[in-house]
Amino acid sequence: MKAVILAGGEGTRLRPLTCDMPKPLVPVCGKPVLFYILELLEKNGCTEAAVAVRYRGERIEDALGDGRYGNLRTFVSYEDKPLGTAGCVKRAAADFGDDFIVISGDAMCDFDLAAMYRHHKNTKSAATIAVKSVDDPREYGVIIGENGTVNGFSEKPSYINCRSDLANTGIYVISPEVLGLIADDKPVDFAKDVFPEMLGREMQLGYFAESGYWCDIGDIAAYKRCTADLINGKIRVQPAERVITQNSHISRTSFIVKGAYFSHKALAAGCTSVGAGAYISDGAKLNSAIVMDGAFVGEDVTLNDCIVCPGARIGSGAAVYENAVIGEGAVIGENAVVSGGVRIWNNKRIDRNASVTSDVKYGSACAPELSEEGICGTTNTVITPGFSARAGAAAAKISETGIAVSYSGGNASESIAKALVSGISSAGGTAYDCGNVPLPVLAHAAGLLGADTIMHVTARAQTKIPIFSAGMLPLKRGRERVFHGALVRSEYMSAGWDSFGGIRTVTDAEMLYTSELARITGFTVPYDVRVVSRNVRFRDICAPFAKAVSNGKEKLTVNIGERGDTAEITCGDTFLDRVALTLIACADNAETGSVTALPFSFPQTAEETARRYGGEILRYYASSMDDRDEEARKLAASQLFMRDGFRLALKALSFISRHAVTPAEALELIVRSSAEDRFIRLNCPPQRVLDRLKAVPEENEGAVMQDGDRRVFLRPDRRGTGLYLYAESFGTETAASLCDSTERLIREAAKSVEKQY
């Protein structure tokens, strides 16, 4: 059996560990990951392995020495230019002539490769993919299949898009015929190019489910977790030789590699790992810390759940806290404090007594995850002006035509918004500073300015910074990943002094919005229209136009949500909720020959209502993976009234005026159903709950449970913390009751899943 080991990755998410060290040589308990893979291949009967390298390939070649690892012979295959996962394999395996294994050199695993190889041969597949069930699918390629046969793929999906928990581990058995599908001298990827082409050609593509250990040490958290797993005996591999000591100050879960010096007056607790040649001085306290080869830790140092790279020096009395990383050769001065999450790049020096709260090179690595509400965190603790500037710089990376920014509220909101604008400029982006205006006003101005990105700041005890594409649409998955990656890893451009982007102050955003309101309020209704909202600023903007369409004494109240993007109407005993107003807007559009774009989660009655009036509905996704909903998204961006509460209410009132009906009668003119939505928080991966429920996956987003005239659409939230339920009932059962019964099923399924973890 032969193999190709992919060892060309740069490991950008592991920086500064990988600034100078290729990812396959990152050590876990004193031994590079690559060596664990070599041992795994030899154990499973492999006799020859090509190691495909590119980034710092010479260091990997030096580490391989004479090319012998036990009974395994290795040789290095260089890429002179990027060829992708498949292209480099074709080059490396050119002389193999038989089925062979492809495996990553930077992922720890203990799979039974021999069993997988036999399975591949027995099923006569052209290629076989090793898959592993994972909790969080967002950074993996997920395969969709059954009975060992692959039917499709979903590349690094959002939880929203996830329909399977079977991750493509990047471990394959490949037959020589597959190499014929790979073009020469151009980047070709197995998951993105080769496997989809195989499906198109109806070639046999199988999968082999593994229950063994597998961890792609792609980021700092995964690397730390892998180290702890090895120490705790969860991985069937042989680590470097460790020191056996009776020192009561060293916990049984600590791993001190032979050749390290660890003072008998120092303390090691938790899953601490200390590499060869490292020196731990008297009084040092290490708790779940990783100290690599040759690092020096001075007297009375505190290292808590952090990483110290090779050759780094930590001065006496210094403290390094959770998730911080001290780069290779860096020096931390005496009594300095490095806060949690901070990364000190290679060879940087921190002065004595300094307090370091942000990355020395690029900025803070502590970034909250994106949720449905955007970036959220405690004001001036998590979301500071400094953090906001970095968020602006990260946003500039995904914008081509400019970012429109506004804020609501007082000094805190203004300060954070101004920092956001400065960050955009510092990364070479164009910022439109629209000042203190509500979100719908900002969105309208952004459309006129041609900005492709919208950010709005509301800072109270908690700060919320939603980020949208043009038209207040959710970011497509690709843009979301680039933005979040830039924010977390500080991978954005720092412009030269003469390359800062323009900051354009927009003073007439409110005037532009009110001009639009004046244009669309050329009608009246026989009611006294009043606007109420907790958003006082937006209420005051809208109130004159509510008065302008009023031509009666009976009170009609438009209740606008605090963010300004939703509305409800109350008139006597009649109540028009957000769904009803949207359906009336669909009918109004259809009558005028317009198509309407709606999110995929909106009730299906929209299609029936539109058809009744000779129109149609296009749907867009909450997390678009590709361009299949591009037509719908472009249309939605031009229909801001669907995400502007007051304009939606005005559109419904215009329909009421034109048809000369009451709000109650307007309800009879649309196709009605009972609709309800809610969010269910979970303590387990939501996609596994969907699997237990036997919910039918939709094409690109979520899953559906349908029984006659009852339908529930379910989709995970962006962070994978729970499920959104969108219930719709055409029968006697209310949607609220349907939500209740579905929630009970979800809770039962979640308990069953949780028992496994």
Image (cartoon, rainbow, N blue to C red):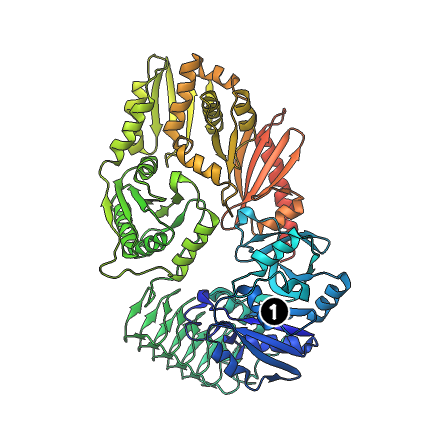
Residue at 65% x, 55% y: name it. Answer: 198
| Total residue callouts | 1
Q: Specify the quadrant of the image occupied by residue 550.
A: top left
> Is 36 rendered above or below residue 466?
below
Q: Please tell me which residue is depicted at 61% across the width and 54% down the height of the picture.
A: 196
Relative image position of residue 654 (x, y in whole percent): 39, 19
- Residue at coordinates 56% horizontally, 51% vertically from top-left? 683
Does any portion of residue 429 appear in the rendered image? yes
Question: How would you rate the neighbour count of disc 1 (Cα within 10 Å): few for under 14, some for 14-19, many for 20 or more?
Answer: many
Question: What percent of the width, then of the height, locates residue 505?
Answer: 22, 43
**Placement of the C terminus among the 4 image quadrants:** bottom right
Left or right relative to 12: residue 85 = right
Q: Is residue 104 visible?
A: no
| Quarter of the image that includes the N terminus | bottom right
Question: Residue 576 location, x and y as percent?
Answer: 46, 23
Q: Is residue 65 above or below residue 236?
A: below
- Image point 28% across, 73% down: which residue? 353
Q: Position of residue 163 (x, y in %)?
A: 61, 48
Q: Considering only vertical position in the picture, is 101 above or below 611?
A: below
Instruction: From the image, tell me which residue sits under label 1.
Output: 103
Position of 691 compared to 227: left or right? right
Q: Please tell me which residue lies in front, 339 or 671.
A: 671
Where is 523 relative to 477, above or below? Answer: above
Q: Residue furthest right?
A: 122
Type of amino acid at the residue the image marks with label 1: Ile
Q: Nearer the viewer, residue 735 or 707?
A: 707
